[in-house]
Amino acid sequence: MNILIIGKGGREHALGWKIASSPQSSRIYFLPGNGGTLSIGTNIDGDYNDFQFVKSTVERYKIDMVVIGPEDPISRGLSDYLSDTGAYVVAPSKNVAFLEASKIKAKRFMKKYHIPTADFDVFEDFDSALSYVQSRRRWPLVIKADGLCGGKGVEITRSYEEAQKVLTEFMINKKFGESSAKVVIEEYLKGYEFSVFAFLDGDKYTILGDAIDYKPVFDGDKGPNTGGMGSISPCVFLSQKMKQDVREKVIERTIRGLKSEGLYYKGFLYFGLMWTDKGPYVLEYNIRMGDPETQVLVLADERDWLYIFQHPSKFTGIWPAFKKTCVEVVLVSKGYPGKYQKGYEIHGLPSIKEAVLFHAGTRRENGKIITWGGRVLNVVACAEGLSEARKKVYKEVQKIYFDNIYYRKDIGEASRWKGIL
Ligand code: AMP
Ligand code: GLY
């Protein structure tokens, strides 16, 4: 079978690795891939937002299955565009992309179908948003730009002045263009964040796993948010009862809601959740897998995902049983998520024996692997328990070096969950 994976990050390397580890044999192509995907497949140079080029690639390489990693081509309709090629596309149609691409539509959908989510209001003009925050007595408040903002469209504001500044940036200065012209303002929720990942086919769903993501750049969750500085799977605090709540109140209500709207969903669905004292609340949906969560999930879940993609109805409702805990540390270029330098040689990769390496911003040049992005490498180690996996991954991380390397030192520290464990 010929498989094309769209994207260039650690998530796509991990999906390719998972497919390559399936007993079914396949030839894997990446568009465009990175310095690590070359070791398991063929990189095709080009722009995946050029849909005609993607279609001609599918035809040229006789692709049987296309797996789309990032949200932008999905929300622009790549899955629909490829539907007449005969290839099986693992990604949903544009008509369900609102779940990620519009916070306003996603929140209204959740409200309509009684899916627990923070109370909210929608504002389409600056003056009414401002007078709303002026009248507020309880802080913090969460301000979310409506559209896709590359993970930067959410701000937690703790005072009227802060809220005014964010609203001005979003709605007047249009920091993210039309994506931030409208906003959702919602209640701040207290609790423990985690994510659940499913593969949907209409009303059938396979849970691929659960994970915790570390978004802020510095230890102790300080500093600006990033795409993700580390991840662990499974989520350490989820009991059977909590899983049952997530299934019933979140996943199944979402599926029933989609059906009631006459929408067919096929592909990955990512639930960004907060466990509160009232149970699970949805912070966001994503119409794709997470990055860096995919990189831990492919190791924590030992099942054959290629088989799951082909037979999505076989595992409906089952939460996978995890035999191990996996911890992932993301190595980044110092300065990320702001400005950083790239082009430095990466040393020590062949000495990694007890962890799996997924490349993100890397490139192979003249036989050397060099840094080529903000998030550079993902190092994942698994063991029977969290503390053992954590020790193992940091031991391996120390063997890798490049100029301006930076990573968080507190991924998998159990003290983070002392209130819930
Ligand atoms: P989102 O893109 O909606 O997931 O928001 C990004 C991050 O902001 C989340 O991962 C949370 O850490 C935080 N966040 C979003 N909504 C809320 C909320 N209602 N209460 C507290 N934190 C939130
Ligand atoms: N790690 C967060 C995301 O993929 O959106």
Image (cartoon, rainbow, N blue to C red):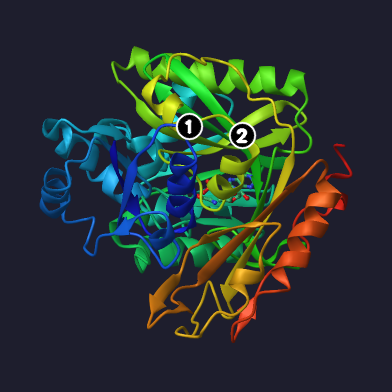
Q: Nearer the viewer, residue 343 or 60?
A: 60
Residue 195 x/y as whole percent: 60, 38
Height in image: 412 above or below 330?
A: above
Height in image: 239 above or below 66?
A: above
User: Going by the image, does 346 lie left or right of 159?
Assistant: left
Q: Quarter-wise, where is residue 313 in the image?
A: top left
At mark 2, the secondary structure is loop
Q: What is the three-letter code of the residue carrying label 2?
A: Asp
What residue is drawn where x is 78% and y is 25%? 239
Q: Quarter-wise, where is residue 191 in the image?
A: top right
Residue 214 seen in render: no
Quadrant in the picture for the N terminus: top left
At mark 1, the secondary structure is helix
Tag 2 and tag 1, C-beta contact below 8 Å:
yes
Q: Which residue is mark 2?
A: 301
- In the picture, the disc for residue 223 is none
User: Going by the image, does 106 lie left or right of 409?
Assistant: left
Quadrant in the picture for the C terminus: top right
What residue is drawn where x is 33% and y is 47%? 28
What residue is drawn where x is 45% and y is 28%? 199
- In the picture, the disc for residue 305 is 1
What residue is drawn where x is 53% and y is 22%? 251
